[in-house]
Structure formats: C-alpha cells, structure tokens
C-alpha cells in the first residue's frame, strides 16, 4: 500500500468509456490512474486530489478539452498541473490550439502504449526537475535574504555606534542625530508629495538615506575636545579648525567606501557630510559651492541641521523657540538655503516643532 501511495497520480479524462478502460489498463502498472468521464467530475475531484498529470480528450459534450484547460490555467492552484491532450483530432490547427492553450504535448489516437508511457515518463521527469529547480531557487532566495538582513543589521549597528560616539563626544548636542533624521524624513516626504526634485529623490533608497544621515557630523571625531566642547563662542582660528570636521568626515567615509562592497548608503553619507555646511549663495564651506552644485542631500541636511542647532541649548546661547527657528530658516531662503526646499519646509514646520516637543519628554 505504501508503494502504491508513492506512485504518481494521473487523471484520464475522456467521455468514451472504452478509451477510459483501455487507457487505465495501459498505465496502471506504473501510475495511480483515475478514469474521469467529464469535465464537471474532473473539477469536483480536483478539489480533493492534485494529480501529477492530466491526460485530456478534446471532443467531449458539455465541456470540451479546450474549455477544461482554459479553466485549469486560470486557477492558480491548478495552473501548474501538466496537461497532455490525447485526441482523434489529428490536424495541425487543433494541435496548435491545444499547445497554445498550455498543453505540454498533443498525441493522436490511436497511439501505442510504449509511446504514451515514454511521453508521460519524459514529461513527469521534466516537471520533477522544474520543481527541484524552483525549490532550490526558493532556498537560495531565502538564504540571500537572510544574509542580506544580517549584513543590514550589522551595517545599522555600526552606523548607530559611530553616531552615538560622535554624539557622546559632542555632549552639547544630545538628541541632535535622532531629531535631524526625523526632520529629514518629514521634509523629504513633503518634497516628493509637492513634486520638488522628485525625479532625483525617487532614485534614492530612503532607508539608506536616513541611516546615512547619522554620519553627517562624523568628522567631529577628529576635532579636539577643547574646541568641540568649549563653553563659549569659538575664536576665528578655532572656528577654522572646527570647519575641518566636514573634510575629515568625507575622508573617513571614503576610507569605508574603499573597503566596502555596498556603496549606496555611503554615497549618501559622503554627500550629506560634505555638503551640509555649504550655502545656496556660495558663502558656505568647505568648497564654497553654489545653488545646485551643492548636492540635494547636502541642501536638505543644511535645513535640518541649522534648525536643530537653533532650537538647541549651547553654552554660549539659549535655545531659540521653534517659531524663531522657523523664521530664521525662512529668512535664509535664497541665501543660506535652497528656495524650493525652504518653501517645502514652511509646509512642514509645525511637524518639525512637534518633533522638538516630543524629544523634550
């Protein structure tokens, strides 16, 4: 009985009882064969039994073989069942139609038992190979997804650790990195909604972009604590040293790029780090870039970074209110900041303010 259950199942569909009996006798030595006299009975059986192959006559009353195969191919749970036509319709047009509807073979009646058995054997072997390949492909895809998730988790952990290290050293900017990420998320969503720079933004992986934003001040690791945490305004000389954190950050990110296979998030990180202190009118640093010569990543971060600096407490200044920060950003339109992005910012300024309020609790 166990051996019988291992045999592949074949459904033989024909309205002629003699053909059903003859066909079953030919096949029963190798397969479990179910003789079926009509399409209606076939579909009733298919609700409980999924065969390895269907052998199908064409010229049948009520439901032809062509109608049956059309229904099979339209139903996902049956669409992959191999169907072979066994028919007396021995003209090329009928054969072409049957194959076009998805049949794997078309055999004319009368046929020899050895020929039919060999055709069935070959097609079942091919079907088995296809199934094995699909299972292998699915397994490989799962393995790749698992490995990708591991790499992504490791990448995120490294980014978070480096960002925490920067924020720990620059102890006057607690929460700055988290808030700027949230500002950017809100700003970019509205930018895309308004159709501003949407063509470029749609090429970005937003998850990578927001993760990479954590590295915008990574170059501060190279700045002396005496300057980084000075309890008062910087002298001109000290400020010149502080400005070098931009180039130091770009240099550090490039070193990572040189030793990494995945550059997408690093490219965003480098453009953000290198461009967020440039100004629309060319008066920024380190390169004095103007307008759209500044990367879009840098222009976005400029707004997020300045806004957060304004609302944050420093040893040499009290925090500005969110309304004052909004006014200063808007006054910088066309000077410090990209005019189009300031217009977008104005529409989400209340959301920026809510992010600030939420971070205080």
Image (spheres, grey):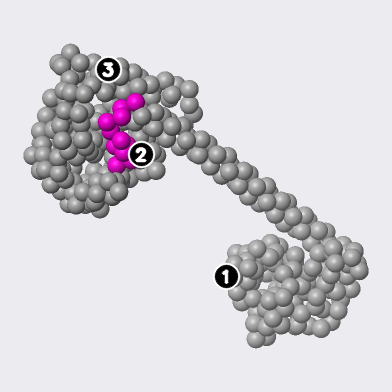
Could you say which quadrant of the image residue 338 lies in?
A: top left
Q: Which residues are magenta?
A: 169-179
| Element at label 3 | helix
Who's the residue at 88% across and 70% down the image?
28
- On the image, the x and y values in percent for residue 100 come to 60, 64
Contact check, label 1 and label 3, Cβ < 8 Å: no
Residue 60 seen from this side: no
Q: Nearer the viewer, residue 321 or 259?
A: 321
- On the image, the x and y values in percent for residue 20 come to 82, 78
Who's the residue at 59% across and 67% down the image?
76
Residue 2 seen from this side: yes
Could you say which quadrant of the image residue 66 lies in?
A: bottom right
- Quick one: label 1 or label 2, which is nearer the N terminus? 1
Q: Nearer the viewer, residue 176 or 316?
A: 316
Q: Which residue is mark 3?
A: 226
Q: Which residue is mark 1?
A: 74
Q: Which residue is mark 2?
A: 209
């Amino acid at each position: 009985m166990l051996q019988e259950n291992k045999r592949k199942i074949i459904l033989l569909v024909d309205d002629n009882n003699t053909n059903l009996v003859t066909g079953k006798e030919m096949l029963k030595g190798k397969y479990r064969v179910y003789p079926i006299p009509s399409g209606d009975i076939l579909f009733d059986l298919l609700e409980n039994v999924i065969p390895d192959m269907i052998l199908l006559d064409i010229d049948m009353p009520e439901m032809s073989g062509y109608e049956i195969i059309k229904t099979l191919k339209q139903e996902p749970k049956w669409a992959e069942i191999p169907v072979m036509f066994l028919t007396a319709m021995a003209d090329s047009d009928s054969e072409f139609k049957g194959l076009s509807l998805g049949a794997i073979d078309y055999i004319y009646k009368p046929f020899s038992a050895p020929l039919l058995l060999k055709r069935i054997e070959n097609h079942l072997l091919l079907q088995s190979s296809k199934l094995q390949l699909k299972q292998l492909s699915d397994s490989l895809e799962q393995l790749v997804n698992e490995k990708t998730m591991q790499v992504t988790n490791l990448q995120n952990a490294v980014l978070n650790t480096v960002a925490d290290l920067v924020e720990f050293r620059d102890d006057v900017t607690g929460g700055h990195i988290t808030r700027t990420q949230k500002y950017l998320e809100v700003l970019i969503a509205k930018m895309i909604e308004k159709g501003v720079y949407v063509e470029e933004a749609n090429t970005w992986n937003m998850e990578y972009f927001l993760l990479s934003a954590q590295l915008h001040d990574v170059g501060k690791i190279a700045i002396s604590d005496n300057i980084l945490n000075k309890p008062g305004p910087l002298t001109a000389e000290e400020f010149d040293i502080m400005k070098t954190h931009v180039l130091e950050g770009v240099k550090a990110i490039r070193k990572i790029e040189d030793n990494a296979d995945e550059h997408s998030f690093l490219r965003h990180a480098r453009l953000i780090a290198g461009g967020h202190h440039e100004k629309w009118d060319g008066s920024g640093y380190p390169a004095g870039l103007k307008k759209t010569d500044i990367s879009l990543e840098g222009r976005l971060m400029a707004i997020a970074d300045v806004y957060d600096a304004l609302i944050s407490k420093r040893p040499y200044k009290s925090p500005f209110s969110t309304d004052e920060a909004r006014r200063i950003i808007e006054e910088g339109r066309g000077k410090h900041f990209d005019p189009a992005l300031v217009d977008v910012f104005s529409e989400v300024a209340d959301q920026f303010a809510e992010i600030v309020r939420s971070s205080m609790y």
